[in-house]
Amino acid sequence: MKTYTGYLTFNTAKKQEFINITDQVEEALRKSTIREGLCLVNAMHITSSVFINDDESGLHKDFSVWLEKLAPFGKDKYQHNLTGEDNADAHLKRTIMGREVVVAVTNGKLDFGPWEQIFYGEFDGQRRKRVLVKIIGE
Ligand code: ZN
């Protein structure tokens, strides 16, 4: 069995962003030379996500509005922020949008369903963060 471990780094201009990372994960898969197996992609920070969905800008605005309704930004709204932090909303948004995805690797390609793309979701950005790409197979 072969294994590949790679890291993607992000430092977003805005506090909240969605970035399509499909090309970067496909590049990691090419480097791995793995043809059949599994590809795990996970955010390594508790205020950012990795998720799979459609690359459609209206949908991304819908995600933002929905998340802001569920967990609005606000220093005085949360117990967690009593610690002096201001990012409780980002922890909640991360939990809703998920930590990781696993994609099957078939014949050297990420075996997506129709319209599936991989996104990095940042909820407390403007600092350096990492995403792990781990691929196993043969
Ligand atoms: Zn925090």
Image: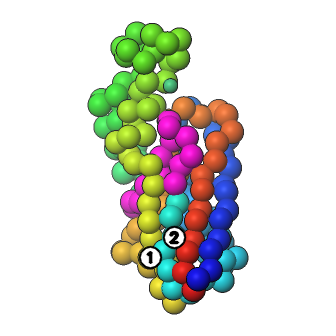
- Residue 28 appears in which quarter of the rendering? bottom right
Q: Position of residue 79 (x, y in %)?
A: 38, 15
Side (left or right) of 127 relative to 44: right
**48 w.r.t. 37: above or below:** above
Direction from residue 3 to residue 121 in the image, left or right: left
Magenta stretch, residue numbers: 42-54
Secondary structure under badge 1? strand
- Note whether 51 is above or below 105 in the view shown: above
C-beta proximity under 8 Å, tags 2 and 1: yes
Which residue sits at x=36%, y=75%?
113
Reply above or below: 90 against 137: above
Q: Which residue is mark 1?
A: 104
Location of mark 2 (residue): 39
Q: CA distance from mark 2 to mark 1?
A: 6 Å
Which of the two discs, 2 and 1, labels the residue nearer the N terminus? 2
Q: Amino acid at mark 2?
A: Cys
The residue depicted at 66 percent of the width and 77 percent of the height is 32
